[in-house]
Image (tube, rainbow, N blue to C red):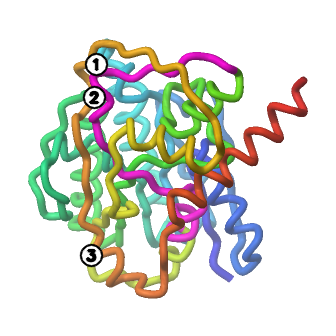
Amino acid sequence: MMTLGIIGATGFIGTALKNQIQKAGTSRLIIPTHTIKTRTEGYTLEALKGIDVLYYLASATIPASSWEHPERELDLNLRPFINTMHAAVDAGVRKLIFVSSGGTVYGTTTEPVNETAALMPISPYGIFKCSMEYYLNYLNERFNLPTVVFRVSNVYGPGQNIHKGLGIINTFIERALQHLPVSLFGSGEAARDFIYIDDVAHILYKTADKTQQYNVYNLASGHTYALKEVLHLITKTTGLTFNIEYKPRRASDTLRMAFNTARLTEAFPEFKTTAIERGILNTYTHLQSQFQQSK
């Protein structure tokens, strides 16, 4: 039986992946012990012993926070990542799977980008995600260690903590349920690709024992929606209405992100992403239930 390990198991994607692994019941799961020290120094060899496939999902920052404090990317993200990767090599990990940020590493795009497109991040967050990807290339070349990078688009769905500053769809729905205004930065024409959380967890889990033709994949739905269009879809699907407050566009935000997902489709031909209407309804149902329980 294969043993899987998750760095970042308490986060949004990590929790969903952990649930997927436990539900399947075909692999052992190790959650390396997290301490204050690992936040700046990474995980040790002892913490990673016995793991065959290691997922690295951890991030201590978001794009907006990195804009004002780029130095934190080095101390809180890159250095712990590098140290953990070398500990993984020493511990005999046989495969590394890394969740990168499709929404930041490419910068703004006008056409759907594939995995060979130039990386043009505009935020320190995206810059350091690129650095991590490149470091995995080094580990692959030096130690012949298989690595897989997933450049994930905007993830949404039940279980996302919007108070960390991420999650457009979840934020819109939560604020509407609480009769609070929704902020749109710019004109609302900024466009994103949205992918449902269960879809991400499914692909990550299936990758553990799968031989990949490539080492980088766009993990996205392949469909792009302007934020104003997302608000309309939420209203159409759930009946929620919005009080919109328009604010100046943030410099850290990309204007448009669109992804070519041909590689993903080739690697997982049986896989179909969740339609955004279905994902919105699932998210609304979950959040509405939570909201009613909190009253």
Which residue is tagged 1?
250
Left or right: 87 as drawn, with respect to 219: right
Q: What percent of the width, then of the height, locates residue 33?
A: 68, 43
Residue 253's label in the rendered image is: 2
Badge 3 marks a residue whose secondary structure is helix
Q: What percent of the width, then of the height, locates residue 225?
A: 35, 48
Residue at the spot 35% in from the left edge and 72% down from the top edge: 146
Magenta extent:
179-204
Which residue is tagged 3?
262
Residue at the spot 62% in from the left edge and 40% down from the top edge: 160
Whole-number angstrom distance, CA of label 1 to CA of label 2: 6 Å
Q: Are marks 1 and 2 in contact (CB under 8 Å)?
A: yes
Towards the viewer: 30 or 13: 13
Q: Magenta span has 198?
A: yes
* Residue type, numbered disc 2: Asp
Badge 1 marks a residue whose secondary structure is loop
Residue at the spot 51% in from the left edge and 81% down from the top edge: 209
Relative to 269, residue 33 above or below: above
Quadrant of the image containing the C terminus? top right
